[in-house]
Image (cartoon, helix red, strand yellow):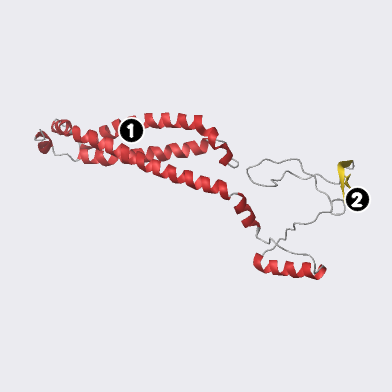
């Protein structure tokens, strides 16, 4: 504070620089993904430029304020053009349009992958249960309760699903660096994200195992014994 800085060039015979009168916090000048870069704010008298961007705060409809802003500028100088008026929300939305599109695209692929995983687990467990119909009938004929058969099928199906989930999470951690450019205020290995994804996949796997397991628990021992 109080020191002077010279930028080393001039514009319209005005030498850039002057006394430092304040220090401000970091800002994201161009987009949300990029980090803060060194910036110097200069008054117009010290930095005359051909165009100026103004920010107007309002509590009402921005469209109404835009008309008032145009009228105010026209009253100051009818020769000053006013263009590019838009709400700040639109400015932010346009700056994140491409990352948002990539996120939606990846989210859609993730949803398809989750559906395929659920169908695959269901198909494998249902096939295994169908192959073991006689075994299930024998177990129930020997005194096993439907709940025991249900727990057996779910436990065996979830064991394989959890092994696959562990392998998938390790692969996701290894490949997470590829998504670094698409993340904002998140690390590629964000614990909460991996926890939610793991819980969601576990729940889907449990449901995919439960449906054929429930069917196996309703097996009629007499029908199962006649399966062969």
CA neighbours of label 2 inside 10 A, class few (<14), some (14 to 19), many (20+):
few
Depth check: 116 or 129 in front?
116
Q: Is residue 61 above or below residue 9?
A: below
Look at mark 2 in the image and give the residue it sits on.
13
Q: Are marks 2 and 1 in contact (CB under 8 Å)?
A: no
Q: Secondary structure at mark 1?
A: helix
Mark 2–mark 1 Cα distance, whole angstroms, equals 76 Å
Image x and y of residue 105, in percent:
48, 46
Q: Quadrant of residue 23?
A: top right
Q: Residue at x 49, y 47 (%)?
A: 104
Image x and y of residue 228, in percent:
10, 32
* Quadrant placement of the N terminus: top right
Q: Residue at x 47, y 45 (%)?
A: 107
Q: Residue at x 52, y 48 (%)?
A: 101
Image x and y of residue 112, in percent:
39, 44
Look at mark 1 in the image and give the residue it sits on.
158
Q: Horizontal placement of 176 versus 123: left or right? A: right
Q: Horizontal placement of 78 versus 176: left or right? A: right
């Amino acid at each position: 504070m109080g020191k002077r800085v010279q930028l080393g060039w001039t514009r319209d015979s005005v030498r850039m620089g002057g006394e430092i009168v304040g220090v401000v916090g970091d800002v994201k000048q161009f987009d949300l993904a990029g980090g803060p870069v060194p910036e110097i704010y200069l008054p117009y008298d010290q930095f005359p430029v051909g165009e100026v961007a103004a920010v107007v705060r309002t509590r009402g409809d921005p469209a109404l304020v835009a008309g008032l802003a145009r009228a105010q500028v026209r009253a100051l100088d009818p020769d000053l053009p006013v263009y590019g008026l838009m709400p700040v929300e639109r400015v932010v939305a346009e700056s994140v349009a491409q990352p948002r599109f990539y996120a939606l695209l990846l989210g859609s692929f993730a949803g398809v992958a989750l559906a395929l995983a659920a169908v695959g687990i269901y198909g494998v467990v249902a096939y295994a249960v169908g192959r073991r119909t006689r075994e299930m009938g024998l177990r129930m004929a020997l005194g096993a309760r439907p709940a025991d058969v249900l727990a057996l099928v779910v436990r065996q199906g979830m064991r394989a699903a959890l092994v696959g989930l562990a392998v998938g999470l390790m692969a996701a951690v290894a490949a997470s660096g590829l998504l670094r450019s698409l993340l904002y205020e998140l690390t590629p290995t964000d614990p909460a994200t991996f926890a939610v994804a793991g819980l969601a996949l576990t729940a889907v796997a449990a449901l995919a195992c439960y449906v054929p397991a429930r069917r196996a628990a309703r097996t009629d021992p007499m029908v199962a014994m006649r399966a062969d």
